[in-house]
């Protein structure tokens, strides 16, 4: 039975797990010991370690055939030291994983002025957060090429699910941008991203990037309006960019500076991915079903 190491223990990782248990022996790298029992019950073997502490990673060398790397970079700095620590630990064994899947972000493209783009678009990270993702991608590509490990990079946009909708934001009445200033935004349901990770294990090509986005073609405020209508909440007020800057945090505004319309042909053709939630409307409808059954 092949061995899978999941690095990063968040929501998407937990959604991946049911697709792996029974078919693979799954290890989960956890920083928080309190999560260990829950992951063990779900079918994974917990390994307590911290990507910020390179000395804690000794047990992962030679452990896995496939690594699913979902851990974010550190919150500061210009490089992803966590990815560097991970690769250094894996490299201490002569038995390297045959494949490593990394979940990155579509933020690596920066602002595209609302243009339609695909994976051939040049990288132009405009925030330190996205810059650390670019650093991780470059580090992984070089390591994979040097060691003969198949590296697949999945670039995810805004991840949503029934429990990841902007309901609190809408309830607070936080503003969105007026139509003249609004940006195109891209989405993927967390369940579809989880399936894409498994599909990349099976079908992803070496040193290849994939935009894991759905079929939606939406501006950000229109997305908020769709969610508001579905849950009987008021539409957010629409303000100019200047007025919104006075009402929102710099972090919130950072997501309103970049406009992209990202295509997904590659995940459908190469990863053979069939989206369970092709549009945001499909995901919202599913969330409403769950809400009604509670």
Image (cartoon, rainbow, N blue to C red):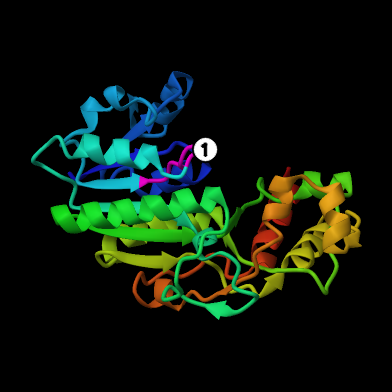
In this rendering, is residue 174 above or below 86?
A: below
**Could you tell me residue 177's position as x and y percent?**
82, 63
Q: Quadrant of the N terminus?
A: top left
Task: Give, as a single range, the part of the protein colored magenta.
Answer: 69-77
Q: Residue furthest front?
A: 78
Q: Secondary structure at mark 1?
A: loop
Left or right of residue 102: residue 283: right
Residue lying furthest top in this view? 34
The residue located at (15%, 35%) in the rendering is 92
> Taking 189 as reference, is 174 above or below it?
above
| Residue bearing the label numbered 1 | 76
State which quadrant residue 255 falls in: bottom right
Q: Nearer the viewer, residue 106 or 279?
A: 106
Residue 23 shows in this picture: no
Q: Does residue 231 appear in this view?
A: yes
Quadrant showing the C terminus:
top right
The image position of residue 41, as x and y in percent, is: 41, 28
- Residue 91 on image: x %, y %: 17, 40
- Left or right placement of residue 227 versus residue 152 in this view: right
Residue in view at x 33 percent, y 61 percent: 200
Q: Quadrant of residue 33?
A: top left
Q: Magenta segment: does it hold 58?
A: no
Q: Find residue 51 and report its horizontal and vertical position in percent.
A: 37, 31
Per the picture, the main secondary structure of the magenta-coloured stretch is loop
What's the residue at 46%, 44% (across, down)?
Answer: 78
| Magenta run includes residue 76 | yes
């Amino acid at each position: 039975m092949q061995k899978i190491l999941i690095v990063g223990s968040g929501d998407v990782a937990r959604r991946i797990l049911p697709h792996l248990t029974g078919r693979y022996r799954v290890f989960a790298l956890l920083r928080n010991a309190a999560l260990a029992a829950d992951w063990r019950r779900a079918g994974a073997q917990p390994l307590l370690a911290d990507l910020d502490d390179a000395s804690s990673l000794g047990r992962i060398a030679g452990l896995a055939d496939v690594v699913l790397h979902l851990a974010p970079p550190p919150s500061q700095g210009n490089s992803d030291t966590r990815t560097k620590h991970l690769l250094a630990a894996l490299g201490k064994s002569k038995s390297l994983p045959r494949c490593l899947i990394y979940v990155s972000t579509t933020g690596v493209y920066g602002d595209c002025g609302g243009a339609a783009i695909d994976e051939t678009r040049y990288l132009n990270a405009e925030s330190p957060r996205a810059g650390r993702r670019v650093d991780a991608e470059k580090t992984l590509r070089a390591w994979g090429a040097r060691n003969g490990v198949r590296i697949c990079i999945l670039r995810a946009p805004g991840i949503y699910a029934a429990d990841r909708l902007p309901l609190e934001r809408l309830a607070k009445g936080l503003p969105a941008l007026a139509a003249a200033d609004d940006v195109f935004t891209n989405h993927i349901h967390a369940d579809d991203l989880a399936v894409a990770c498994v599909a990349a294990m099976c079908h992803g090509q070496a040193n290849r990037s994939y935009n894991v986005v759905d079929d939606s073609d939406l501006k950000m405020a229109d997305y908020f309006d769709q969610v508001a209508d579905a849950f009987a909440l008021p539409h957010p007020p629409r303000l100019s960019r200047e007025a919104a800057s006075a009402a929102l945090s710099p972090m919130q505004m950072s997501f309103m500076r970049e406009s992209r319309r990202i295509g997904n042909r590659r995940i459908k053709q190469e990863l053979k991915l069939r989206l369970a939630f092709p549009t945001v409307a499909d995901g919202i409808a599913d969330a409403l079903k769950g809400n009604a059954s509670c």
